[in-house]
Structure formats: C-alpha cells, structure tokens
C-alpha cells in the first residue's frame, strides 16, 4: 500500500530521526486511507 524507503545503515542520529518522521507521516496517511475505505465501502 505504500512505497518502500530505505534508511542507510550508517545513518546518523539526524538521519534516523528524519526516517522516523517520514515513517510516522506515511503510517498516518495509510491510517487515513483505511478509515476512508471503511467509511465508504463501495457497492
């Protein structure tokens, strides 16, 4: 359902934090999409 993304093995603390924030944003978007699908199940 979502595009994969990589976190470099040698990511520093800032890089890991950026990845964490990106993951959190993607999860929220997926949750929103899932809720819309449940609210509007279609025919």
Image (cartoon, rainbow, N blue to C red):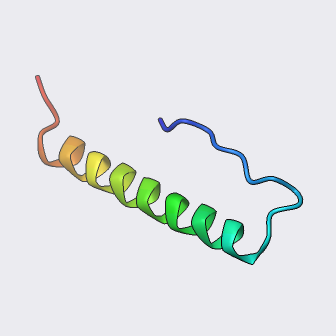
Q: Give residue 28's position: percent from left, percent from top.
A: 37, 60
Closer-to-camera residue (43/23): 23
Residue under the point 54% across and 59% down? 23
Q: Give residue 15's position: percent from left, percent from top.
A: 69, 66
Closer-to-camera residue (14/33): 14
Q: Is residue 27 left or right of residue 23?
A: left
Residue under the point 27% across and 54% down? 32
Q: Determine whether 22 is above or below 14 in the image.
A: above
Q: Determine whether 4 is above or below 42 in the image.
A: below
**Rendered image quadrant of residue 43:** top left
Residue that extends furthest to the right in the rendered view of this protein: 10
Residue that extends furthest to the top in the rendered view of this protein: 43
Q: Give residue 34's position: percent from left, percent from top.
A: 31, 48
Residue under the point 64% across and 43% down? 5
Q: Is residue 1 left or right of residue 11?
A: left
Closer-to-camera residue (41/14): 14
Residue under the point 63% across and 73% down? 17
Q: Is residue 18 left or right of residue 24?
A: right
Q: Determine whether 14 is above or below 35 in the image.
A: below
**Rendered image quadrant of residue 13:** bottom right
């Amino acid at each position: 359902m979502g595009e994969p993304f990589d976190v470099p093995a040698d990511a520093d603390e800032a890089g890991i934090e950026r990845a964490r924030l990106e993951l959190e944003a993607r999860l929220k978007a997926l949750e929103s999409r899932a809720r819309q699908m449940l609210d509007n199940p279609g025919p």
